[in-house]
């Protein structure tokens, strides 16, 4: 497997733009970002940090209510395990490390499979969360006069609020661990190639018989452009756009060098 960005000096001074090539990875990446937001606000002790955690957790619940994430995660864990098992015959593979990874995947799969019912269902049926969710559709709808029970909870000491938040996050722990591992495998499954976008435009076809999961475009921070990726499993395009905080961004006309990773696993 290739080095991650953190371990690859060539990418450390770049901005990475990612584009998922299927719905499963798209949902996984949305959850990854939400859990990272939760991590950030969990370090704070203020009422506003707790509010931010609750607001983000409601987004997590929405994704879980719309998707059978237990089943989707189990399928992806099984797929990765099968791919890695086939690698066992490669003499260049570190067998001890591979066995450790396969054991971890198997443990996660068994623990996740053993969880009864729909993940997060108890939180979805929590009366406090239901009331917050209903009022959250109204701008500013979670004021003290809207939700006195929520106002009371927010005024509890930080230790009590943190304990409640940790218990509410617990049902998602296994899925989060699995998603972190799976996305890391995918991101490090291929080496980046040097490419050039002529007139700020790049297009490439993909072999649809191969399970491409994710596109990654690395652009030097010194470049005054951002990458706009679109497409699907057959073909994709990358346009380099000139940012504008007032008007609509426009495509640059320069030839832009960048690094492309077509993650395949």
Image (tube, rainbow, N blue to C red):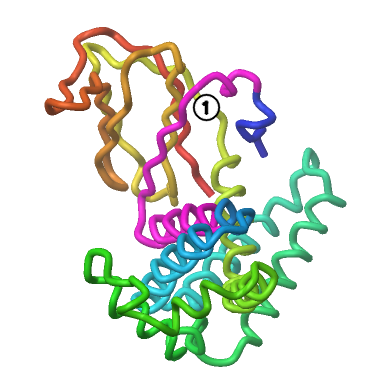
Regarding mark 1 in the picture, which secondary structure is present there?
loop
Image quarter (top left, top right, bottom left or bottom right) of the N terminus: top right
- x, y percentage for residue 80? 60, 60
Name above or below for residue 92 compared with residue 72: above
**Is residue 219 visible from the viewing direction of this image?**
yes
Front residue of 44 and 215: 44
Name above or below for residue 31 compared with residue 251: below
Residue designated by label 1: 192
- Residue 13 lies in the magenta stretch: yes
**Is residue 174 visible from the viewing direction of this image?**
no
Name above or below for residue 137 compared with residue 42: below
Q: Main secondary structure of the magenta part?
A: helix
* Residue at position x 42%, y 29% in the image: 217
- Residue 22 lies in the magenta stretch: yes
Front residue of 246 and 94: 246
Report the span colored magenta. Answer: 9-38
- x, y percentage for residue 71? 49, 78
Apparent side of residue 201 relative to residue 49 in the rendered image (left or right):
left
* Residue at position x 44%, y 84% in the image: 149
- x, y percentage for residue 96? 87, 51
* Residue at position x 65%, y 67% in the image: 158
Residue 248's image quarter? top left
Disc 1: CA contacts within 10 A as few (<14), some (14-19) or many (>=20): some
Front residue of 17 and 262: 17
* Residue at position x 15%, y 21% in the image: 250
């Amino acid at each position: 497997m290739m080095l991650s960005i953190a371990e690859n000096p060539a990418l450390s001074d770049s901005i990475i733009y990612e584009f998922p090539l299927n719905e499963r990875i798209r949902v996984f990446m949305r959850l990854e970002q939400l859990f990272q937001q939760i991590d950030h606000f969990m370090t704070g002790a203020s009422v506003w940090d707790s509010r931010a955690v609750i607001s983000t957790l409601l987004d997590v619940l929405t994704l879980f209510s719309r998707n059978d994430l237990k089943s989707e995660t189990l399928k992806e864990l099984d797929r990765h395990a099968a791919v890695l098992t086939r690698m066992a015959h490669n003499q260049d593979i570190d067998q001890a490390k591979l066995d450790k990874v396969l054991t971890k995947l198997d443990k996660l799969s068994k623990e996740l499979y053993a969880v009864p019912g729909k993940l997060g269902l108890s939180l979805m049926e929590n009366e406090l969360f239901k009331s917050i969710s209903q009022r959250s559709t109204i701008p500013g709808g979670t004021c003290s006069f809207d939700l006195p029970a929520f106002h009371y909870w927010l005024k509890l000491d930080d230790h009590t609020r943190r304990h409640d938040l940790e218990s509410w996050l617990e049902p998602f722990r296994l899925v989060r661990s699995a998603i972190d591992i799976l996305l890391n495998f995918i991101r490090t499954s291929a080496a980046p190639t040097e490419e050039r976008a002529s007139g700020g435009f790049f297009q490439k076809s993909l072999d649809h018989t191969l399970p491409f999961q994710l596109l990654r475009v690395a652009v030097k921070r010194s470049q005054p452009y951002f990458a706009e990726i679109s497409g699907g499993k057959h073909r994709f395009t990358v346009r380099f756009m000139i940012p504008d905080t007032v008007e609509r961004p426009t495509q640059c006309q320069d030839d832009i060098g960048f690094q492309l990773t077509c993650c395949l696993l």
